[in-house]
Image: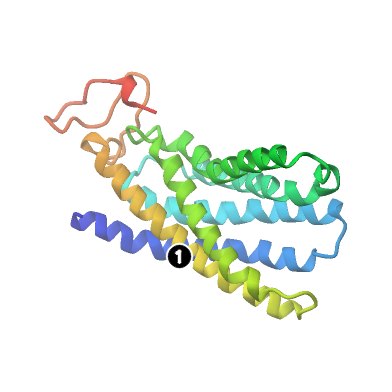
Amino acid sequence: MEPRDRALLRTWIPVVALAELVGFALPAVVGVLAAASPTAVSVPALIAAGAVEGALLGAGQVVVLRRVLPAVSVSRWVGATAGAAALAYLLGLLPSTTASVTASWPVPVLVGLGAVLGVLLLGVIGTAQWLELRRHVVRAGGWIGVTALAWLLGLGVFLAVATPLWRPGQPVAVAVAVGLGAGALMAVVMAAATGVGLVRLLARSPGRAGTRGVPLGPGRAGPDPRGSGPAPVRHEERS
């Protein structure tokens, strides 16, 4: 790993982890406070809180990302992450909010729907961010898989820690503390996984296209590593 890659990781992991933890604090509190509320209240509240979490996560990511990809749009990155996070919360809440309807459905159907929801939930943030990242990095489609794996690991850690510690009827402060503690571990795992994935993605991008602030687009490409001029446009390499 090159020194610049190590420097990127040293910045990315703490900044992104902190941004996610601060953002996650709102859904954690809302989730505990709205646990006994009607679905018509709790679901919109959690989705809105999820959008805030996504905006803060996106802001933390783009602050670091622009150090290596200066042309990345802050508004598009943050907006895409916020919208995708809200959608992820909606997808995550569907099983519990529709349980009364789906309880009698055949098990194979429920398993299939659960698998589809899981894939969508894990991939939605990476897909939304890819729409901006593909403007600056060749073969940016790998970011979708990177973020899906990162969230799979992060959410797995969160559930493994929080689920056995949450108890019915426990004080609100304790429930929130458990959620935030597990959320901190989730944030670190997610940040580390996405950081490593980002470094590898940039390393595979020929000439690190876009790292000098030259966006990729129709008729343009990043700097040619073989010379000082622009590289030939190869649309088939973009994903």
Report the residue marked by disc 1: 188
On the image, the x and y values in percent for residue 121 come to 60, 45
Judging depth in this view, the residue of 62 and 102 nearest the camera is: 102
Find residue 160 and report its image quarter.
bottom right
Q: Which residue occupies 53% across, 47% down?
A: 78
Q: Position of residue 209 (x, y in %)?
A: 27, 35
Q: Secondary structure at mark 1?
A: helix
Mark 1 crowdedness (10 Å alpha carbons): few <14, some 14-19, many ≥20: many
Quadrant assignment, res 196: bottom left
Q: Quadrant of the N terminus?
A: bottom left
Q: Position of residue 154 (x, y in %)?
A: 51, 59
Horizontal and vertical percent for residue 3?
19, 58
Name the kind of residue labelled 1 in the image. Answer: Val
Report the front residue among 75 and 141.
141
On-image quarter of the C terminus: top left
Name the residue rendered at 41%, 66% in the picture. Answer: 14
Please tell me whether residue 96 is drawn above or below residue 29 in the rendered image: above
Q: In the picture shown, does residue 120 fall above or below 216?
A: below
